[in-house]
Image: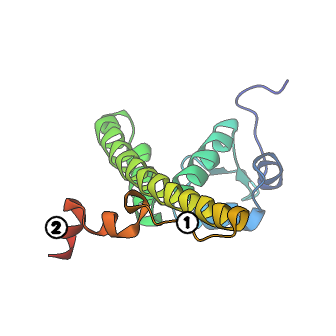
């Protein structure tokens, strides 16, 4: 097993993270990879912690965090322990947005499931099923939160 602080070249980092060398260099140019040093020949030197960092960046992007927010977070990390509270707040705020998105997608998935079941029943019986008010888009559109947004 390699020691935790083994030096990695960019190709090794790419192979271990499943990202391209181009993508890693792009992240670095964006200021999103802290702690990258260069050796005497000017080549980038990465460490094991960069593997986890790239995984975090991928998850943040996947969950909708903007590059600007990722830069802000990375800048806080680079500043050290004095910014731990700000780091926590930034990630907590993002987590709230992720949870809201999940709730919206969950609601949309339920509606899709109902519609698929509707067509399944129609295909099975040969008769168009009666509409169920609790499953319609109209109920969603008339909810209090929708009305406030429309106003």
Q: Quadrant of the C terminus?
A: bottom left
Residue at 64 percent across and 37 percent down: it is 49
- Point out residue 35 in the picture as x, y percentages from the top left corner: 56, 46
Q: Quadrant of the N terminus?
A: top right
Nearest to the observer: residue 48 or residue 55: 55
Between discs 1 and 2, the one toward the N terminus = 1
What's the coloring here?
A: rainbow
Residue at 41 percent across and 65 percent down: it is 136
Q: Can residue 14 be spotted in the picture?
A: yes
* Secondary structure at numbered mark 2: helix
Residue 79 in the figure: left or right of residue 142: right
Q: Which circle, 1 or 2, is nearer the viewer?
A: 1
Residue at 72 percent across and 59 percent down: it is 42
- Point out residue 30 in the picture as x, y percentages from the top left corner: 53, 66
Nearest to the observer: residue 129 or residue 95: 129
Decide: is 123 above or below 14.
below
Residue 88 in the figure: left or right of residue 113: left
Nearest to the observer: residue 26 or residue 123: 123
- Point out residue 95 in the picture as x, y percentages from the top left corner: 40, 45
- Point out residue 132 in the picture as x, y percentages from the top left corner: 43, 61
* Secondary structure at numbered mark 1: loop
Numbered disc total: 2
Q: Which mark is residue 101?
A: none
Q: Which mark is residue 148?
A: 2
Decide: is 23 above or below 13.
below
For label 1, count other residues whose C-alpha is less than 10 Å away and answer few (under 14), some (14-19) or many (20+).
Answer: few
Residue that label 1 marks:
129
């Amino acid at each position: 097993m390699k020691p935790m602080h083994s030096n990695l070249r960019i190709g090794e980092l790419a192979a271990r993270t499943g990202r391209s060398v181009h993508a890693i260099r792009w992240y670095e140019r964006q200021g999103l990879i802290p702690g990258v040093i260069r050796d005497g020949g000017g080549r980038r030197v990465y460490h094991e912690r960069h593997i986890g960092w790239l995984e975090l960046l991928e998850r943040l992007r996947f969950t909708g965090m903007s590059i600007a927010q990722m830069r802000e977070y990375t800048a806080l990390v680079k500043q050290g322990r004095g910014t731990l509270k700000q780091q926590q707040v930034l990630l907590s705020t993002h987590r709230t947005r992720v949870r809201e998105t999940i709730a919206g997608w969950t609601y949309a998935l339920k509606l899709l499931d109902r519609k698929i079941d509707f067509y399944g029943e129609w295909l099975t019986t040969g008769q168009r099923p009666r509409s169920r008010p609790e499953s319609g888009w109209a109920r969603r559109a008339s909810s209090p939160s929708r009305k406030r947004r429309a106003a």
